[in-house]
Amino acid sequence: MNDEKNLVTEEEAAQYRLQYLQKFLGLSEEESRTLVAVLTQSTPKDWIQERPIRGGGTAKYVPGYRFIQKFNDAFGFLWSQEFPELIREGNEVISKGRWSLQVPGRTVTRTHSDGMVETARFDGFSVIKEQYGSAEIKRYAQNIFAKDKKGNTLKDANGKDIIRYKQGDVMDLGNDFKAASTDAMKKCGTELGMFLDVYGTRETAENAGPTDTQLQAFYKRASDISKNEEEANAWAAERLGKPLKEAKQQEVLGLVADLIDIKKEEKK
């Protein structure tokens, strides 16, 4: 049997999507079509930028403010974004993002041809998307010396140059957490169909295997709850339904967060 014959066509899927939006969001057909178009339209070329990636090469991406612009265009400033978990692990920061849209309840009244009036009440509900984002902690590549207003290097009492920031010092941890949170927000946006022509056609970080830093973080957190490497691998395989070596970066980030939560529960 050819499985492709059992797949619905794109036209059928699009029609079903419109009916779903009309039924559960209370939108008209025209409003539903507009919402889908706003979320899934092709990304303007001048919105797409490139950045270097680990291992060499570059990857295309869309800046975070464009996601915010798209959310506002689609949902009229009524959406919300939370970051309930911020984790510093080794030389990486992790942020759990939770995007949500509150759909209010509504009452629909319909009069039938025989004069009977039918009233239906739809309860309100929330649309929620959750994803983990990550960012590498940025550090100074060399010593940064203190300067006066004229740009002259300041000296200490012994005549030595005063170092303001040492090589290897963290530059701005808050900014790193912001980058990780933006990464999480973007991933939530792609779950709504945004910019898939950019993020859906290349191998992104969340689809790649875990980095050595992430695996080290995983085994360290596992050891915190008294699991050796073999036990940690078995625990991960049970959680994921596959060996840890086959896990994606996003999945390993989730495991690290789960281990931290387990440790917190043990301390209570």
Image: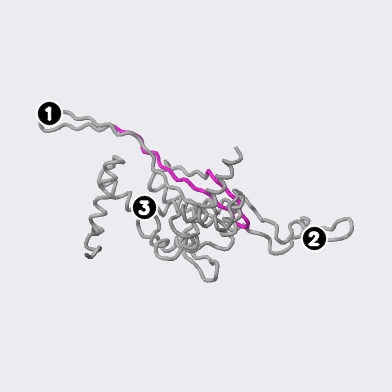
Percent x, y for residue 141? 68, 64
Residue 58, placed above or below residue 69: below
* Residue 141 falls within the magenta-colored stretch: no
Q: Quadrant of the C terminus?
A: top right
Amino acid type of the residue tagged 1 in the rendering = Gly
Look at mark 3 in the image and give the residue it sits on: 39
Look at mark 1 in the image and give the residue it sits on: 115
Between residue 235 and residue 259, name the one nearer to us.
235
* Residue 92 falls within the magenta-colored stretch: yes
Q: CA distance from mark 3 to mark 2?
A: 52 Å
Amino acid type of the residue tagged 3 in the rendering = Leu
Dot 3 or dot 2: first in sequence order is: 3
Between residue 66 and residue 93, name the one nearer to us.
93
Q: Which residues are magenta?
A: 84-106
Look at mark 2 in the image and give the residue it sits on: 153
The nearer-to-camera label among 3 and 2 is 3
Q: Residue at left 58%, top 49%?
A: 87
Q: Residue at left 25%, top 63%?
A: 3
SS label for mark 1: loop
Percent x, y for residue 125? 36, 37
Q: How many marks?
A: 3
Left or right position of 86 against 40: right
SS label for mark 3: helix
Asked which quadrant contains residue 110, the reply is: top left
Between residue 248 and residue 230, name the one nearer to us.
230
